[in-house]
Amino acid sequence: MAFFGISSNSRPGKVIIDDMYVYDRVKDTGDYYIFLVEGKLDALTEKRLVQDIEAAGYTSYVILSAMNGEYNADDISGSKTEFSLKNKSRWNRYINYKGKHVRAIMAFGDSLLQINKSDDCLTNDFMAEFVRSYYYIGHGFIGNYDCHIFPVHSLSMIYHHPKEDLTKVDLNYLTQWFREQLTRMLKPSYWTPDLSPAKVHKLTTREEVEKLLDKHEGDEYCSFDLETTGLSWRHDDIVCLTICWDINDGYFIPWELIKRLVGVERLAKHFRSVKHLIGCNPKFDIKFLWQNGLPRDILPTDDTMLLCHAIHSDRSKGLKPSAFYFTYFGGYEEPLKTFRKQTGIDNYGEIPSNILDQYATLDVIVALRVYFEAYKLLDELETKVIKDDDYDQLFDDEGNRDKWTIKRWYEQMMMGIYPAICEAEYIGVRIDIKVLDKNRQMMIEELKKAREACAKVFNTDPLFDWFSTQKLAKLLQDNGYPQVGETFKTDDEAMIEWKRLNLKGVSELENLRAIWSCLNTFMGLNSEYRKQAQVKDKDPTKKTGWLEYLDYHEEDNSWRMHQLYNIMGVVSFRCSSTNPNMQNIPTRGKWAPVVKRCFTTPTCPFFEIDDDKGNHWTLKYDDKVETQRGIVRADELVETDEIIRKVAVRKSV
């Protein structure tokens, strides 16, 4: 038979074509399957794979290598996806073969990266009994597949060879999972997403927008999204609004059209009228809209990221991976990715209309499809997979047993706190800039003293680079510190052991580390402060700690940090925060009060204070009171102050 001009035996079997591994057992009739392995197979692995494939009942199939030649995954530097795509074989010519279209593809290990052209979703994302173990890819974005993909791990993990005898194989749960996937891929039918086409419409006139909003006034579902010039809702601009009321038609509306002609108040009226206002991480978009005049009582009702997290808390849940899980649009952002990579343009306001319009509008169409499919999966989970006894049983206010479902958890708990989180991010956390600057200067002086104390103990220069782990490790080794663990480290575990051994200098090092951690993580340093602290300045433009996130509000002369919250976003469903991380603020220790005193509250004309003695004080912000540390203004009081009396103000005659 001929393989793209290369002749081989007519008997089906293994050949090498253009440095691509091919094991061809495709029959002329009936369905056939592709098993896409990462590279060439050794004889032993090939034998085991063929045995498993045929034992599962496959009679028409082809094994192909995704990449040309041989490679060692451990030797790859940089992006595995980029490496895979650069070394791609011509395996996809077998998607249509012998006048037929492949029924399904089983992707082994890193070959999945090549199919998806990204690492948006990986094999582990499909390894759960309660979610589908496969997905469907359409055509036109990352390739013309139009088939289902069944991910499994690499063959080196499925057939793990003990070092002492490579002819043996240790079977494990990944072997079992692979064999279960073989069974699933042979089933007569698969779940398939809605395959109806998406249509992108660009609106250019006020009349078009108003007519559309009128048409969909009071609709059940509305998916919305923004594209912006950057990530800061305070300093960047909206480029466009995209909106979708069904799963087929999406509309691109330039923001200037809303801002100058339609009016934000008209958009607000429409958003109030719909029952479900849906987005993927819509708290990002709603803050931009609030900043541009949308009333703050308008809030999203549904977030597909949280919905997907409620279903499976241990896999990626952004819109890009969800497009693979729930729709046929996986990889729809590929034209935009290619453009950005080729041009280096990240500002969405500078992206050509023919690229941005398509990508941005597909965002809302995909989000709405994900929403509907995720709810269908929820219904399936709660009727077929999860038994009644598996639900946590709680009591309601009347003492009746109250059953909790995943759907109820998402709707009442996760989305229940959504408004408060949106508001918290928008308002931000206030910082007293004077206290912050004062405490930073104090800690810089303390850092110098701590460094001198360490230098005295270890008989070295005070300007020694104490914050280089390699240099510090060598200094400690030279001073006889023992190794803790497999390698010599200077981490907390090592410090605890050295402290137990009562080694010299441990307390001094701990003090130095605590000061540096608070100074660099909270007070923040820039080039000027690093110079004052006499630490190396590798990047003069870099800001650390809270300095990186402080934002000045001219309207009330306040400094704030607008942190981001991951709503119940960790595996355990607790909340976390970033930019900055508000979970690592110290609660005890010498420097905890120094950090906490940097926070402040909005200016308030009155304070209501209950002290430990049971006294109640009503004070104006500028009232003066006598405390154990002297006379201070009411707005200067701290938690440790004890109010003795209110100081009377002498009135002038």
Image: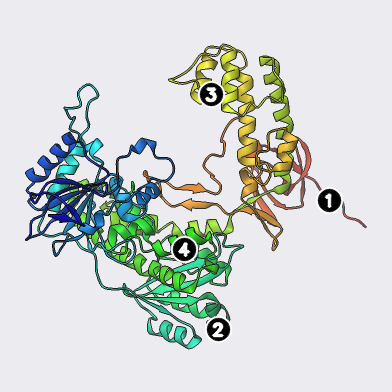
Frontmost of labels 3 and 1 is: 3
Q: Give the Cα distance between marks 3 and 2.
A: 62 Å
Mark 3 Cα within 10 Å, few/some/many (few <14, many 20+)? Answer: some
What residue do we see at 67% from left, 47% from top?
541
Mark 1 or mark 2, earlier in chain = 2
Q: Is residue 13 left or right of residue 115?
A: left
Q: Position of residue 236 (x, y in %)?
A: 59, 64
What residue do we see at 32% from left, 73% from top?
198
Mark 3 or mark 4, earlier in chain = 4
Could you tell me the amino acid type at mark 2? Leu
Q: Give the Cα distance between marks 4 and 1.
A: 69 Å
The residue wearing badge 1 is 649
- Relative to the observer, which residue lies in front, 195 or 162? 162
Q: Is residue 158 left or right of residue 483?
A: left
Q: Is residue 169 left or right of residue 456?
A: left
- Relative to the observer, which residue lies in front, 116 or 98? 98
Could you tell me the amino acid type at mark 1? Val
Q: Give the Cα distance between marks 1 and 2.
A: 57 Å
Q: Are marks 4 and 2 in contact (CB under 8 Å)?
A: no
Mark 4 Cα within 10 Å, few/some/many (few <14, many 20+)? Answer: some
Q: Give the Cα distance between marks 4 and 2.
A: 31 Å
Q: Position of residue 168 (x, y in %)?
A: 16, 27
Element type at mark 4: helix
What quarter of the picture does the C terminus occupy? Answer: bottom right
Mark 3 or mark 2, earlier in chain = 2
In this view, the residue farthest toward the right is 653
Frontmost of labels 4 and 1 is: 4
Circle on res. 424? none
Mark 4 or mark 2, earlier in chain = 2
The residue wearing badge 4 is 339
Could you tell me the amino acid type at mark 3? Thr
The residue wearing badge 3 is 490
